[in-house]
Amino acid sequence: MRGTAGGRLIIERLANGLRVLLGTDAIDDRVRRALVANLYARPIAQVSGNLIGLGCAAVTAWASDIRALDFLAAALAGATALRVTINIALPRLAARATRAAERAYGIATFLYAALVGLLAAAANLLNAPPAVQVLTACYAVGFGIGGAGRSAGRPQIAIGQLVFATLPLAAALAIRGDPASLATAGFIVLTIPAVCSTVAHVFRLLHRSIDAAETSGQLAERMQQLANTDVVTGALNRAGLDQQLRERVAALAPGQHLALLWFDLDHFKQVNDTLGHQAGDRVLAQVGKRLGEQAPDNAAVARYGGDEFIVACSIAGRREALLLAQRLHEHVTAPFRLNGAAPTDRAESGAAGAPMRVGTSLGIALLPDDGAEIAAVLQAADLALYNAKLNGRNQAVCYDPAMTRSMAVRREIEDELRAAMLREELSIYFQPIIELATGRIRAFEALVRWFHPVKGEITPDQFIPVAEETGMIVSLGNWVTAQAARVAATWPDDVMLTVNLSPAQIKAPGGALGILTALRSAGLPPQRLELEITEPVLLERNGGTDAFVAGLGEAGVRFALDDFGTGYSSLSHLSKYRFSRIKIDRSFVSGSDAGSRGDATIRAVAEMAGALGMELTAEGIETIEQARQMAMLGCTLGQGWHFSRAVPDYLAAMLIAQERDSPAAVRLAS
Ligand code: C2E
Ligand code: CA
Ligand code: CA
């Protein structure tokens, strides 16, 4: 048993060795490439070896006058030229067409070795001068052995080269038949297995070390790739993008631009909150996939953290960047199912299997136009993105230098508004709302005022949006309600208070409670408060809005629809919520839309409001003519500078007192 196992092992070893020597063993392409490159390495050494061969041929031709030797010497010179040419021309090919390079090297080497062998054999058999015999024999054996060592990376070439160079000489010596020649032939033949074994050994060492280097190189490459890739989406991560940006900026040709498109998914938190984080991850993966598919081939697509993605690519100009942004936006926001299929219907959202779509805001900036450095362009794209969100989200916006300025102003307002609330620089003014038929004061609208000690008055249009973005509006709104309610509590019971309400106050947890608490602390019955809300709030309809309106409505608070006619006017809101009043926006009364078309709108709304039992207020009445016109069109209430500007609380009290004494003071002249 043991004997057969040992025998099998030896046979296996021999077969392996043979495979190695014949070059039929399976080796990895990368390893083969390195081994073949090794053949072509150090061409100077190879060329100098060939020059020795050339010298050998020249001496042979010169020192003997045997025609066959001259012919072989000439052929050897030709083969030398071929080898040198291949050695110089092919190293570059070795990297691309490994097998062709290997074959070319093999054929040239075999041809050369055969000529070397034949020259030595012929010199011997044809009785060339002894010096020539020694020279050619030495060269044949030296070339055979030395060359085999050098070509050990491809063993079949090494062995072939050895055999072709030495066997003809050994055969010639054997033919001569004298004992010394026979002994020399024997020695030469015996060196062949010894050299083969050495070649196999060197090959194995080379193979192993190249293999190890390749593996660790591949590993390092893979690690690098992993370190630069986002796990959830497979896109680049922040580190990967940074690296790409650095490379791309360095490679940017003069006149070329690098576009940065910064995507931020709208309301992504809601996806996470309502459908879970796994679903959120799937949405992110889907967005990453779509960007990867639709972005130009040369683009870098990265997830820049959270729900933000950046696409970077070289581009001709701003117009092209905007077109690309629009195309990508369209694809990212197309509906999809979380389970993978792409539905064609246009549902807004849904559970795991239902079609959903995510809105995306997008900021665009170009290098070098919007900043000479990556950091500056990123900042510009971020600012553009911020403006895209500000303009109502789900759109692409290009950077504009004015954004930097308005941003600075905004930041300043934000900082100062905090201080102003603490220092009590804010106050509330009241503007009367008049019953057009009688001139009686029916209500006052509370309007916040900010008198800055240095900058003078800062208008609500400047600071309310900032307060809304930063969330400060919630505490500011509650403060306004509480202060105004305290003042209103001192008025006669039939004078209402109206307060403007921001969307953030509706969405804030405990928003309704904040308002009820303010009323209670001021001692104003909820029935005397009317909250003015604008339509966009109602567009973002959800359970929260309904609960807010219902909760306060039950307590007795009323609601007015403010700025009607601007934005997305939709009469459907009128019947859905129980508004007690509609305020026609001042652009229809004294602004750009005033006139016959505005009048037609007002008339239509008045009719509908009347049918639904709502009152209609005209805002921004500046002249007596406007007041008459609005009354004629069906508005029951009016507000505007014609009656009074917004005034401090003590003047509001005086207006009430005056009107109660003689209503005619503010009554409409008829
Ligand atoms: P709004 O609710 O439409 O308020 C009416 C605005 O029209 C006020 O500007 C008022 O001063 C102005 N106005 C009144 N009569 C006339 C007129 O005859 N002609 C013209 N051209 N304008 C007139 P104001 O006080 O600057 O407020 C601007 C906006 O700021 C308000 O628009 C409202 O949306 C917001 N706002 C003001 N105070 C508050 C507040 O306490 N909370 C919230 N959330 N928003 C407020
Ligand atoms: Ca208002
Ligand atoms: Ca208004």
Image: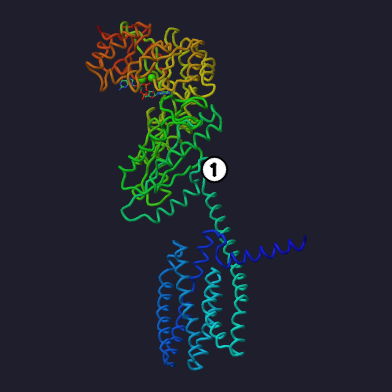
Residue 665 shows in this picture: no
Residue 310 x/y as whole percent: 44, 43
- Name the residue carrying label 1: 231
Q: In this view, does 662 lie above or below 236?
A: above
The residue nearer to you, when weighing 322 against 667, is 322
Residue 34 x/y as whole percent: 52, 64
- Identified by mark 1, the residue type is Val
The residue nearer to you, when weighing 285 against 587, is 285
Quadrant of image for the C terminus? top left
Q: In this view, does 521 lie above or below 40?
A: above
Q: In which quarter of the image is residue 388?
A: top left
Residue 40 x/y as whole percent: 48, 70
- Counting every numbered tag in the picture gives 1
Q: Quadrant of residue 4?
A: bottom right
The residue nearer to you, when weighing 132 against 507, is 132
Disc 1 crowd, CA 10 A, few/some/many (<14, 14-19, 20+) = few
Q: What kind of colouring is applied to the model shown?
A: rainbow
Residue 10 shows in this picture: yes
Q: Is residue 406 left or right of residue 187?
A: left
Q: In this view, does 162 lie above or below 508?
A: below
Q: Quadrant of residue 84?
A: bottom left
Q: For ligand 1, which image quadrant applies?
A: top left
Residue occupying the far left of the picture: 596
Q: In this view, does 86 lie above or below 517?
A: below
The residue nearer to you, when weighing 655 against 218, is 218
Quadrant of image for the N terminus? bottom right
